[in-house]
Amino acid sequence: MKLINCIVLTILIALLGCKSDTDLVALAQRELKSGVINDSLFLGLRFGMERKEFFDHCWKINRQGIVTHGTENMSVMYVFEDGSNKKIAFNFYPEFQNNKTNKYKCSFGYYAWAPWNKDLQSDDLIKVLPTILERWYGGNSFIKVKGSKGIHYYKIDGNRQIDLHIKDDRLIVAYFTDLTKYPLNFDI
């Protein structure tokens, strides 16, 4: 009976286009073992920046008009287009570990989102966001993993992991994590 359940589960995962969490762990271990270090993130930010360096850099790109204050002045916001002239608001802020930026919590949402704008919902954004980020970073493609907490999209290149998941109708939450500084922990 257990063999039949495993076969059915494997078939369902294949049909849904989802990978298992063991595939994800294997990918992460393989990428970490490669020794490749990808510290570059976005807008000139990188893993390992000291707190003052992070704030100085954000102040500089703010003065250049590249970013502005984010939601409730608790993050930095960068607005870009999705390729079809829809603006995306990208809010980010790091977690500081030993005074260094080794993990960023981010959110992506269409700038003109409203409950009645059905084509500006997070379930539409999740269809294009992995492709956008793959263009930004190259390397491995995102893999889709379905777990008990829903569907996550992971991209792992060397030490840099990107985790995307839908938070609600408006936002996609993303974590950019340096896997050399944080233990493997897939919250799925």
Image: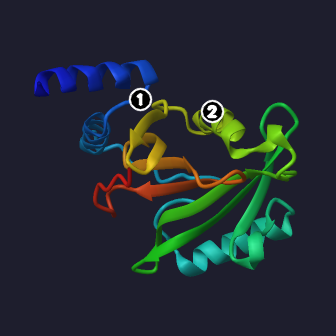
The residue positioned 48% from the left and 30% from the top of the image is 141
Q: Three-letter amino acid code at disc 2?
A: Arg
Q: CA distance from mark 1 to mark 2?
A: 21 Å
Q: For numbered disc 1, what is the local secondary structure? A: loop
Q: Is residue 99 found left or right of 167 in the rendered image?
A: left
Q: Which residue is mark 1?
A: 18
Single out the mark in the foreground, 1 or 2. Answer: 1
Q: How many residues crowd mark 1 within 10 Å: few (<14), some (14–19), many (20+)?
A: some
Q: Is residue 4 found left or right of 46 in the rendered image?
A: left
From the top left corner, tell me how far across and down residue 12 is, in percent: 36, 23
The one nearer the camera, 83 or 166, is 166
From the top left corner, tell me how far across and down residue 128 is, in percent: 68, 33
Q: Please say whether residue 115 is visible from this viewpoint.
A: yes
Q: For numbered disc 2, what is the local secondary structure? A: helix
The residue positioned 61% from the left and 39% from the top of the image is 133
The residue positioned 63% from the left and 39% from the top of the image is 126
Position above or below: 15 against 142: above
Earlier along the polypeptide chain: callout 1 or callout 2?
A: 1
From the top left corner, tell me how far across and down residue 111 is, in percent: 83, 52
Q: Please say whether residue 43 is visible from this viewpoint.
A: no
Q: Quadrant of residue 74?
A: bottom right
Residue 135's disc number:
2
Q: How many residues crowd mark 2 within 10 Å: few (<14), some (14–19), many (20+)?
A: few
Looking at the image, the residue that sits furthest to the front is 1
